[in-house]
Image: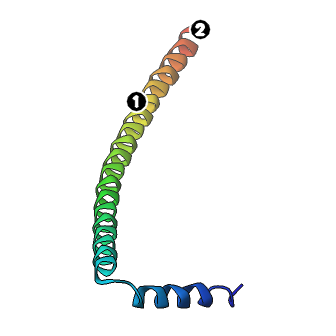
Amino acid sequence: MRLHLPLPAALACIALAACSQKTETHAATAADQAGAAATSAAHDTAANTRVAAANTAAAVDQAADNTAAAARKAGRKADAAADAAANTH
């Protein structure tokens, strides 16, 4: 497998060396566009990560609020059950 990789790479280098100026210009333009696309993708990924982090923080806050509300409700029910048990004796 390793022997098969250098051969196409070498052929690609030879082909690039034999290219006309126009083809080299097109290759350089394509490389520049690929670099710009990679940069844009990196920026998009960073922005999406920031949005995901904000959404996660909001979800954690909501979960904490829901947990606190459930604990308060359970406390009220426990108090009501204790009051009911005290009134039956």
The residue wearing badge 1 is 69
- State the quadrant of the N terminus: bottom right
- State the quadrant of the C terminus: top right
Residue type of the residue flagged with mark 1:
Ala
Mark 2: few, some, or many residues within 10 Å (few <14, many ≥20)?
few
Quadrant in which residue 17 is drawn: bottom left
Note whether 54 is above or below 22 in the view shown: above
Secondary structure of the residue carrying tag 1 is helix
Mark 1: few, some, or many residues within 10 Å (few <14, many ≥20)?
few
Please tell me which of labels 2 and 1 falls first in the chain. Answer: 1
Q: Residue furthest top?
A: 88
Which of the labelled discs sits on residue 88, or is there none? 2
Residue 53, given in percent of the width and then of the height, sits at 35, 53
Closer to us: 81 or 28: 28
Taking the spot 50% from the left edge, 20% from the top edge, the residue there is: 77
Note whether 40 is above or below 51 in the view shown: below
Image mark count: 2
Residue 57, given in percent of the width and then of the height, sits at 34, 48
Residue type of the residue flagged with mark 2:
Thr
Badge nearest the viewer, 2 or 1: 1
Q: Residue furthest right?
A: 1
Taking the spot 46% from the left edge, 32% from the top edge, the residue there is: 71
